[in-house]
Amino acid sequence: MENAIVGTIMDWEINSSGLTQKNVNVDGIDLVYFEGGQGTETIVLLHGFAADKSNWIRLVHTLVSDYKVIIPDQAGHGESGGTLEDSYTPTKQASRLAEFTRKIGVEQFHLVGNSMGGTIALFFAFQYPDRVKTLGLFDSGGVISPEPSELSKLLSRGENPLIADSAEDYDRLLEFTMEDPPFLPWPFAKVMSRKSTPRKELNEKIFADIIKPGKYTTQQVLSAIKTPSLILWGKEDRVIHVSSVSVFEQYLSNHKSVILAGVGHAPMVERPAQTATILRNFITSKN
């Protein structure tokens, strides 16, 4: 019954945004994604760790009339496949995104990522600069904030509130990541926790891969990116501190920064219409 209630609401949200669900096999992994909208330009949206493609549904309401949108469940998340044997480092996920977009016939696009998705977007723009028209970094990973976030302090004590093990954990995750969460139906946390609990070990593997030191330094990656970049942050972000913005500003040569008061780690969920307007205006200004 609970699954049916959540499923019905999600189906309504998806249909009202003009999205269709599709899938494609990439690198031996079945990737599930939303596609919709119209227009000659494409926006690819990447969700964060322990999230999924549904995070972007409300944001695209006002974009689908003018843009084609692609929203994948990244490997190991949502309805996409992924195993403990697969790699989830930013470099590997960027190369997986390159193959995914080519397989579905999208060569150049506007790329937006939140949190882990921002880290992947950074590495994609670094590795495939000719394929990215504009770059959107929404409370993005990829740098060490000058001021430690609440999450980093918890991780130092061996706690990770982003990995949910029960409905109560999932409620706490939503409270931790969002300053102004949207209304959700009562069984939502219980249904989502049922989906995430069996993936606890995989989530731990993905998180470890994301933060694993790579071949390139932050300065090398950011300084090489010349793509017009929108840095959008929730001022009350407890996951990645807003002071991270200053690091991006220091090394990205072509950027615009927007900080939203009263918003946490997920502006596209907390303020979808406002975030969509900011994104649209930025893309339009760069065309």
Image (cartoon, rainbow, N blue to C red):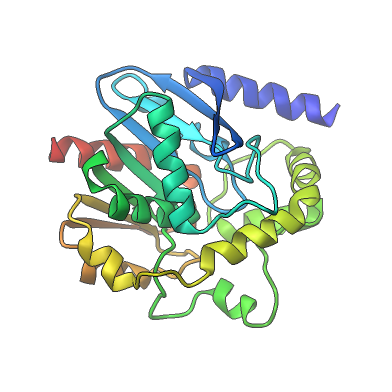
User: Would residue 252 appear left or right of 64 to someone viewing this image?
Assistant: left
Q: Position of residue 127 (x, y in %)?
A: 31, 52
Write down the quadrant of residue 284 in the picture: top left
Q: Residue at x 20, y 50 (%)?
A: 227
Marks counted in the figure total 0
User: Would residue 158 appear left or right of 33 to someone viewing this image?
Assistant: right
Q: Residue furthest right?
A: 1
Rendered view: 131 above or below 116: above
Whether residue 264 is visible to the viewer of this picture, yes or no, is no
Q: Position of residue 25 (x, y in %)?
A: 56, 30
Name the residue nearer the viewer: 199 or 277: 199
Rendered view: 161 above or below 52: below
User: Would residue 219 appear left or right of 94 to someone viewing this image?
Assistant: left
Q: Position of residue 261 (x, y in %)?
A: 39, 59
Whether residue 72 is visible to the viewer of this picture, yes or no, is yes
Name the residue nearer the viewer: 195 or 60: 195
Q: Residue at x 22, y 57 (%)?
A: 225
Q: Looking at the rendering, in which quadrant would you find the C terminus?
A: top left
Write down the quadrant of residue 151 in the picture: bottom right
Q: Looking at the rendering, in which quadrant would you find the N terminus?
A: top right
Rendered view: 34 above or below 176: above
Rendered view: 66 above or below 143: above
